[in-house]
């Protein structure tokens, strides 16, 4: 017999948390790319790198830290749920943990090129 358990919205939100961070980072980074190109930040330099590159790399680092934070919290929630004996609870926490890792990899894959590609040309 299958027992139905009502899943609180807060647990479901953890399934989305990593990709929410990824989407916010994506919008922020590419918005700053457009703003920086419009204001000529690629021609102003901070030592060996342009202001544009510094801003984009800074946003990438912040995005990766935020994504790693979501992975760590999801891992803690997964560990805490493991001993409850409920079937659905560990599944959702495990799925959230895996989704957080996928989002972190997506962040690196989609935003990582700011490290080496030209910004405004």
Image (tube, grey):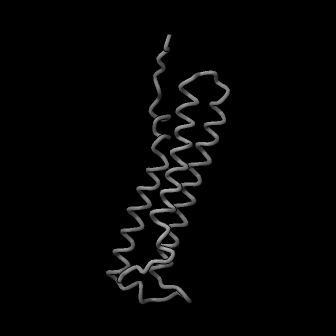
Image quadrant assignment for residue 118: bottom left
- Residue visible at 51% across and 75% down? 115
Residue nearest the observer in this picture, 71 or 9: 71
Q: Outermost residue toward the top?
A: 1
Q: Is residue 51 above or below residue 3?
A: below
Residue at image x 51%, y 62%? 108
Q: Establish if 57 lies above or below 85.
A: below
Residue 66: quarter of image: bottom right
- In the rendered image, residue 14, in percent from the top left (x then y), is placed at 50, 40
- Figure disc tally: 0
Q: x%, y% of residue 57?
A: 51, 73
Judge from the rendering whether residue 120 lies leftward or rightward of residue 105; answer left or right.
left
At which x and y percent is residue 31? Answer: 36, 68
Quarter of the figure that contains the C terminus: bottom left
**Image-based side of 33 in relation to 103, left or right:** left
Is 31 positioned to the left or the right of 45 in the image? left
Residue at x 47%, y 71% (from the top left corner):
113
Asked whether, in this view, residue 101 is left or right of residue 76, the answer is left
Q: Is residue 3 above or below residue 46?
A: above
Q: Residue at x 65, y 33 (%)?
A: 80
In the image, 8 versus 104, the foreground residue is 104
Q: Position of residue 75 (x, y in %)?
A: 62, 42
> On screen, 12 above or below 63?
above
């Amino acid at each position: 017999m299958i027992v139905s358990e009502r899943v609180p919205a807060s647990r479901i939100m953890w399934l989305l948390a990593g990709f929410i961070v990824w989407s916010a980072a994506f919008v922020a980074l590419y918005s700053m790319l457009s703003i920086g190109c419009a204001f000529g930040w690629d021609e102003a330099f901070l030592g060996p790198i342009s202001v544009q590159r510094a801003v984009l790399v800074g946003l990438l680092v912040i995005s990766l830290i935020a994504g790693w934070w979501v992975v760590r919290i999801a891992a803690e929630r997964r560990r805490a749920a493991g001993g409850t004996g409920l079937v659905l609870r560990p599944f959702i926490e495990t799925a959230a943990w895996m989704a957080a890792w996928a989002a972190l990899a997506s962040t690196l894959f989609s935003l990582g090129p700011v490290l080496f590609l030209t910004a405004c040309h």
